[in-house]
Image (cartoon, rainbow, N blue to C red):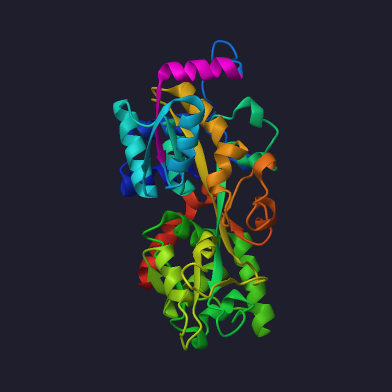
């Protein structure tokens, strides 16, 4: 459970949350979140429930829609929405940190800005946008009861993205079967991943492995590999594994695309491995790359993180926002995202047509981001990793 008072103090120091926003957080004792923590506030109920046709009419009367998004593919989906309903859509792609800062500032000033946001990095979205009330959760009536697990409904997890351990398979199969092998001398300088200080979801992954359940699994995997208990020099096996990766010369990149290209390049003498978004495998053949997923690693094959969708509290086109969220969860609206590495928690569109897998299947083999835990523990992990650099 998140210690709100403590985390508010941390956020005030590290992210400059507005004082009034802090007061609002401490006052929000009635807010609940998925999995027994805190939820986003629900979108205000209309005076009467609209039919779909009434919603379409109200959205068309507003005429325009503004979207902030984490993905360039939102623009493609928006084109389909405009073609279907005649509503002009403006999309702006933002990095995680830019998204949180921009939405927070615009909400404070009540600016005519975004109506809908698609965002990542739950460890910041949770305390800085959800608990401050800057965004509201909206689930179309058509989606109620359609999540394979209701914990994805509040806050609304629109998409789950996988980052997997992927290796160069030009000259052989997977070089490891256990993630502890990445800390061994023979793997020095051979692992690459995006700098977690440049992408929040990567830092959230490292934060997750320090949670007691995952730390225990790492300790168990260590014993299975080496036949002895791990000797700790840090808080737990999660911290110990992170320390091992950094001390073994992990290469930090700025782009998952660049990492995939460097790791998959043919003709290399040393077999490299990376931790990056698995959707990069879609272009591997066209780029002449040799890449394959490491299957059946102990105790995990990588991680999976959520991208959320919300309506902003200051939305000037709230009906168009509701209609777009509904559209984005139809087969037509989801099509630009129905690719390897991207998965919906909604049963009607859950099956990924490229790799024939689902969010439910991946959740059994990957570390799944918990925004509440990440919000509570991430500053400790950031501080710890800083000492390793």
Say whether residue 94 is left or right of residue 131. Answer: left
Is 27 rendered above or below residue 162? above
Percent coordinates x, y for residue 280 in the rendering: 50, 63
In this view, which residue lies farthest toward the top?
A: 47
Say whether residue 337 is left or right of residue 354. Answer: left
Is 146 rendered above or below residue 206? above
Residue 178 within the segment the image draws in magenta: no
Tell me what residue is drawn at x 43 percent, y 71 percent.
261
Q: Tell me the magenta residue range.
A: 52-68
Q: Quadrant of the N terminus?
A: top right
Is 323 rendered above or below residue 366? above
Say whether residue 361 is left or right of residue 24. Answer: right
Most foreground residue, 179 or 272: 272
Q: In which quarter of the image is residue 316?
A: top left
Q: In which quarter of the image is the C terminus?
A: bottom left
Q: Can residue 276 be seen in this view?
A: no
Q: Is residue 288 visible?
A: yes
Number of numbered tags placed on the structure image: 0
Percent coordinates x, y for residue 126 in the rendering: 47, 42
Is 360 rendered above or below residue 54? below
Percent coordinates x, y for residue 321 in the rendering: 47, 27
Magenta span main SS: helix
Most foreground residue, 57 or 45: 57
Percent coordinates x, y for residue 300 in the rendering: 63, 66
């Amino acid at each position: 459970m998140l210690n709100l008072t403590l985390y508010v103090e941390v956020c005030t120091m590290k992210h400059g949350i507005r004082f009034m926003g802090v007061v609002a957080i401490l006052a929000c004792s009635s807010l609940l979140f998925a999995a027994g923590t805190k939820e986003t506030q629900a979108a205000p109920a209309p005076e009467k429930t609209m039919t779909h046709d009434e919603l379409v009419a109200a959205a068309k009367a507003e005429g325009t829609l503004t979207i902030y998004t984490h993905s360039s593919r939102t623009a493609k989906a928006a084109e389909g929405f405009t073609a279907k309903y005649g509503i002009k859509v403006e999309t702006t792609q933002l990095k995680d940190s830019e998204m949180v800062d921009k939405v927070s500032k615009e909400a404070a000033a009540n600016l005519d800005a975004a109506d809908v946001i698609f965002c990542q990095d739950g460890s910041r979205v949770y305390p800085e946008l959800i608990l401050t009330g800057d965004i509201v959760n909206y689930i179309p009536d058509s989606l109620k009861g359609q999540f394979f697990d209701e914990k994805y409904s509040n806050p609304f997890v629109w998409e789950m993205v996988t980052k997997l351990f992927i290796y160069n398979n030009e000259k052989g199969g997977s070089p490891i079967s256990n993630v502890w092998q990445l800390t061994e001398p023979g793997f020095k300088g051979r692992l690459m991943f995006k700098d977690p200080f440049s992408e929040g979801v990567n830092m959230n992954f490292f934060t997750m492995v320090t949670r007691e359940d995952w730390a225990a699994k790492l300790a168990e995997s260590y014993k299975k590999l080496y036949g002895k208990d791990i000797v700790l020099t840090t808080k737990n096996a999660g911290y110990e594994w992170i320390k091992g990766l950094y001390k073994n010369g992990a290469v930090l990149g700025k782009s998952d695309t660049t990492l995939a290209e460097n790791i998959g390049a043919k003709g290399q003498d040393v077999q490299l491995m990376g931790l990056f978004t698995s959707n990069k495998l879609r272009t591997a053949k066209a780029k002449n790359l040799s890449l394959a997923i490491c299957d059946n690693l102990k105790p995990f094959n990588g991680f999976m993180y959520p991208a959320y969708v919300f309506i902003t509290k200051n939305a000037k086109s709230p009906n168009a926002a509701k209609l777009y969220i509904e559209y984005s969860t139809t087969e037509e609206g989801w099509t630009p995202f129905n690719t390897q590495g991207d998965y919906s928690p909604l049963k009607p569109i859950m099956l990924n047509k490229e790799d024939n897998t689902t969010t439910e299947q991946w959740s059994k083999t990957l570390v799944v981001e918990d925004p509440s835990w990440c919000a509570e523990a991430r500053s400790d992990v950031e501080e710890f990793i800083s000492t390793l650099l």
